[in-house]
Amino acid sequence: MQTPHGIRHISQAAWRLLFPPMCPFCEATGHLDGALCPACRETLSPTQSNTCGRCGAPAPRHLALEAGCPRCRKQTFAFAGVYALGDYAGALQKAVIKMKRPCGELLALSLGEALAGIIPDATVFDAIAPVPMHLTRRLARGVNSPEILAEAIGRSVGARVCIDLLRHRRKIAQQSALAPRERKRNVREAFRVSSSWKIAAASILLVDDILTTGATADACTKVLLAAGAAQVRVAVVARGGVNN
């Protein structure tokens, strides 16, 4: 029997033989449902036990982080803390770049699950929201990785995902092309909270792919707090340096 498009129907087992599931990062075959293979899971997982809870940056084990790390100690953030898998370098940098491509959905899902794994079990969020992506950029990129990451984290921790909680007031320039001071100016008053959601006294997890200067996350946090949220924490795949 043929489909309307003339393609013969094949069983799921036969389909898997023709197109075996593969690791979404290294593309090794034989991994069910496109999950990360054990080697990639280990490579992309946190390797440093001493991480700055304030900005998510890895730090030397001997360094005290009560007041933040050297990257963030002199900065003021509206968000309460950051969860990050690691530095934007090496394999994690390659993974972030790959998940932003149209074929990167499975990798983004896997990285979202990995991110959920480093959130303390006692941490409870009333809502999870991705940093919004402007429609024109979303159409150009073909994938919205912060949204996919948020969905994966929400499923893992059992929290409500509010895809449209944050929206753009205007189109902004790409942050990675700007100097640190310009980034703050670029995102100032660039976001708003959708009137569809009531977040009074809510604890919110804000999700993005990378945190570099923290300007975007800080701008989003400020509008969430102004709308009544009690606290905002941030989850990102990688913590970038100011030159990334």
Image (spheres, rainbow, N blue to C red):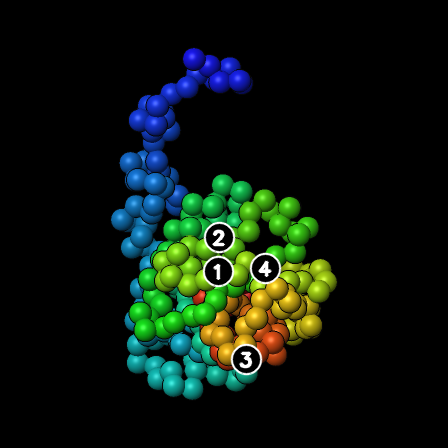
Local crowd size for mark 1, using a 10 Å CA cut-off: few (<14), some (14–19), many (≥20): many
Graded by Cα atoms within 10 Å as few (under 14), some (14 to 19) or many (20 or more), the crowding at tag 4 reads some
Which residue is labeled 4 in the image?
Answer: 164
On the picture, is 179 further left or further right than 12? right
Marks 3,1: beta carbons within 8 A = no
Q: Position of residue 1 (x, y in %)?
A: 43, 13
Q: Earlier in the sequence, mark 3 or mark 2?
A: 3
Q: Which residue is mark 2?
A: 148
**Tag 3 residue:** 78
Confirm or deny contact between disc 4 and disc 1 (CB under 8 A). no
Indicate the position of residue 94 as horizontal and vertical percent values: 45, 51
Q: Would residue 71 be visible to someone looking at this image?
A: no
Q: Mark 2 falls on what kind of element?
A: helix
- Above or below for 40 versus 215: above
Q: Secondary structure at mark 1?
A: loop
Q: Quadrant of the C terminus?
A: bottom right
Residue 196 position (above or below residue 41) = below
Foreground mark, 3 or 1, reads 1
According to the image, label 1 marks what residue?
Answer: 161
- Where is residue 41? Give x, y as percent: 31, 52
Residue drawn 48% across the image and 45% down it: 104
Of 198 and 88, nearer the camera is 198
Please name which of the two marks, 2 or 4, marks the residue nearer to the observer: 4
**Image marks 4 and 3: residues in contact by CB distance under 8 Å:** no
Q: Which mark is residue 201?
A: none
Dot 3 amino acid type: Ala
The amino acid pointed to by label 2 is Ile
Question: Of label 4 and label 3, which has the lower sequence position?
Answer: 3
Cα separation between marks 3 and 2: 24 Å
